[in-house]
Image (cartoon, rainbow, N blue to C red):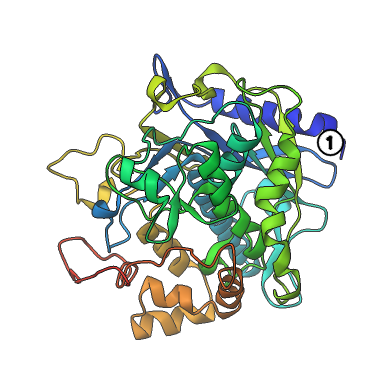
Amino acid sequence: MDTECWGDEVSKKVLWQYKSLPKKGKPQGREVTVLAAFLIASPSKDLEVVALGTGTKCIGRSLLSPHGDIVNDSHAEIVARRALLRFFYTEVLNKQKCSDGIEGLRDDVFNNFLFELGPTGKYRFREGWQLHLYISQLPCGDASLSSCHSAPRNFFSREGNSLSSVDELNGFKDGICEASNLNNDDSLQHIGRVQRKPGRGDTTLSVSCSDKIARWNAVGVQGALLSYFLQPVYLSSITVGRSPNTSEDFPLEEHLKSSLYDRILPLSEELSSPFQVNKPIFLAASVPPEEFQHSETASSTLTCGYSICWNKLGLHEVILGTTGRKQGTSAKGALSPSTQSSLCKNRLLQVFLSLKHESKIRCLAADISYRELKDGAQAYNIASKVFKGGPPFNNWPLKPLGYEAFFQGERCSENVKTWKCKP
């Protein structure tokens, strides 16, 4: 891989795909957003964008739903990753149809499967194929904070909301630092720790993108449910667009390595196969177009409230980041299943249960919840516990009790459960 050209090649592919999408959900006027995408590279290094997301918003703690019917975190990286999961699910489904001899698959689908069956009985990437990530700016959290300290200018906090004076004095709330603009002295204290995304007056439970990407480098991007079918899927490279607010000699690649790889390096001797500490190549790309260029301060930046999610197999939605539901949802029909995004956990559970797997029969017979299904991915959960078992990730926030205890097709007006946060 020619690293000098690869970053700009990745950026060019992603920006072309973004420009090809309709205007709906894109920034208007002075609005800006963040763009992220996953790309697949063939053995011959041909690049193709397979999943894309935009966005800067997330849901506050008071708006969380125990039914899995909203998207809590609509930051671009997270939206793109959920779109990637939908892409993976379709790939696995098509692979299963092929194995069962079901007719109707196009020749191009048959000849271009991304996965092959490995010796463990789970699917893995075919030999020579790679997964790559692009982000138009540094991810929020540790990567952004350390750049605040290293660079002469501060970076924008995506949600556009600074901490209250009490939070600025205390630095932490429930043991988790907010991923917001701190002064340089404060940022020194919080570099490396798990951080939470700020909300507009309502504390969120969404962990920063830097922390989530670091986690992907330990347990894979596929998550718990897809671990029933897939071996861990790791990134081969992470490319980030340069900021117009930093000097050209800012060491962006080393900066990314410090935040997204060095922090998990101590886990090298603790993770068990097939999990590992993954070291992607870190690359810088040219400064992105103006609609992805954030001002130096939150006060002068107007962020787009929508998130676009897209993948190459037909997914294309626009989500309102402050509600976690599809664009155009009315107040009257706000709880209707038709307002649910394809990226919400309830819809992902439906896709999971549509796949052929021996666990499916047991799960349906026992009426097991989404949370119990995730806990059933034993190897993945062991690796996740190792990841969160010590500094700097041992202050990872706990999910509220009952928060993911929903079942397939559960509606908000039914099976209402009482839930509260863990102490």
Mark 1 Cα shell of 10 Å, populated few (<14), some (14-19), many (≥20)? few
Taking the image as shown, residue 24 lies to the left or right of residue 62, namely right
Residue located at (28% from left, 47% from top): 202
Residue at image position (45%, 52%) is: 177
Where disc 1 sits, the SS reads helix
Observer-nearest of 113 and 346: 346
Question: Percent from the top left, x then y, of residue 23?
Answer: 43, 22
Pick out the residue farthest to the top.
29
Q: In the rendering, at what x and y percent does residue 62 appear? A: 24, 53
- The residue most toward the left is 332
The image quarter in which residue 25 lies: top left
- Image quarter of residue 101: bottom right
In this orientation, which residue lies closer to the viewer: 227 or 111?
Answer: 227
How many numbered callouts?
A: 1
Q: Residue furthest right?
A: 2
Q: Percent x, y for residue 240?
A: 66, 35
Q: Give the residue displayed 28% in from the left and 43% down from the top.
A: 323
Q: Quadrant of the N terminus?
A: top right
Residue at numbered disc 1:
3
Left or right: 362 in relation to 112 = left
The answer to whether residue 251 of the structure is visible from this angle is: yes
The image quarter containing residue 104 is: bottom right
- Which amino acid does the dot numbered 1 rest on? Thr
Residue 140 can be seen in this image: no
